[in-house]
Image (cartoon, rainbow, N blue to C red):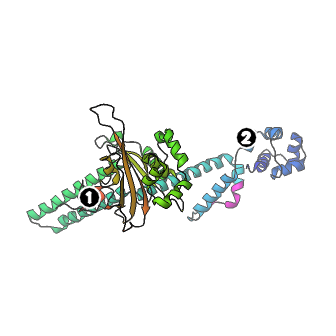
Amino acid sequence: MKLLLGARIQSYRKQNKLSQAELAKRVGISASYLNLIEHDKRTVAGKLLSDIARHLGVRADQLSRGITTDMIERLQQAARRFASERTSQPAELGQIEQFVTHFPGWAHLLDKQIKAHEAGEKLNELLSDRMSHDPVLAESLHIMLSNITAIRSTSELLTLQGAMADEQRAKFTRNIFQESKRLSTTAEKLLLHFDSKISLSAPEATSAPATEVRTAIDEHQADVQPNLPASIVRDEAFQHVREVITAESVVNTLKHHHSDPFAIAAYFDLSPRLTFYRLSELEPHEMLPAFGLLEIDNASGVLHRKEIGALRLPSRSGACPRWPIYRALSSPGHPVMMRMHINSGEFVNAFAIAESDERRHIHLPPLTKAVMIYTEMTAPRPDSYVPSVNVGFHCSICARTDCGDRRETYALLSEG
């Protein structure tokens, strides 16, 4: 909705020192009709608008270009917001319409800056949300803070202690060196976690900060609402799966199979992998749980991910070796089921299976991909035949130090 056209005409008329009667006579209308136009009680467009603009010495678009209700509301909201910060000169809220009438160019410029500021705030919110839900970041920063505290404390001892035996001084110096080494290692891992393409020996190859931020936001938005891989969408077999598996048909099946995707696939005589993907795209409701999904190749590289609940999924590669998806890689075609007891205390129902491509050469084994689907649960049933296994996210941030499958030392452990 365009606003203030009449007020603009009035403003330009007064700048030209014309009375309503003089301007009305020049454009061929009555003074009373021009008065209604100037008070925005009559619309004006076409030839009449062009004639008025010509006699006022301006272009028609200078009179009609868009000052909208949305713009005025944004200006008012911005004025109220900064007024709450007790500025020395509060904005004149009652004169916003006069401002945009007399200074439309400045109004558009200010509105553009306000919209850019709002977009920046949304960007910061998305970044903050991504950071606060990244377990690697949280644990790494905790580790780095511990290292820094240890270095500072030891340095203070060396500085304030004064005379000290050589053996004791050497011990403190060695501690500083070890903590500094851990700090450097953790910082490098954290850097590589956010961009695996960064070369630590070639900082000039890194992306610009704005590009890094935009990439982070794109990844976060993809995590929130991921699309299916193009290869799945184009698969004619998947179109058949979509027709067979609907929200209604799955709910009826769940009454008998208790959210077991393998049982659902067998009931409808469908591929487990395609069934997993179909379940992951269904909208959850009271009778239908939300399904998360992860697919990897035989090098553990992430091909597709949809994350739900407390279970964090790797963004590139590598997670806890106890996860069923990695067990499935060793036995293609064998269904794997597990109650995953994650570090935060939650339980997750997980199902995984691996499929291999056809062998293309006698000396080249087929390539294998594994897919895992999972749902959250309150606690495992005591009579369940599905094993419950303690799992983590990654060895470096997993506190289960007695795990026999550990591949990497827990980063919070101090060296002896």
**What residue is drawn where x is 48% and y is 60%?**
256
Q: Is residue 84 left or right of residue 208?
A: right
**What residue is drawn where x is 54% and y is 60%?**
285
Q: Magenta stretch containing residue 245, yes or no? A: no
Secondary structure under badge 2? helix
Which quadrant would residue 180 be assigned to in this image?
bottom left
Secondary structure under badge 1? loop
Which quadrant would residue 80 be assigned to in this image?
bottom right
Instruction: Reply above or below: 59 against 341.
Output: above
Q: Position of residue 411 (x, y in %)?
A: 26, 58
209 or 56, nearer to the observer:
209
Give the number of the disc on residue 118.
none
Circle 1: residue type = Ala
Q: Position of residue 160 (x, y in %)?
A: 19, 67
Q: Magenta stretch containing residue 91, yes or no? A: yes
Does the rendering let one see residue 38?
A: yes
The residue to which callout 1 is attached is 411
What crowding class fits label 1: few (fewer than 14 Cα within 10 Å), some (14-19), or many (20 or more)?
Answer: some
Give the number of the disc on residue 61.
2
Q: Are marks 1 and 2 in contact (CB under 8 Å)?
A: no
- As measured in the structure, the alpha-carbon distance from the residue carrying label 1 to the one carrying label 2 is 65 Å
Give the label, 1 or 2, closer to the camera: 1
Which quadrant is the C terminus positioned in? bottom left
Magenta segment, which residues? 89-97
**What residue is drawn where x is 52% and y is 43%?**
240
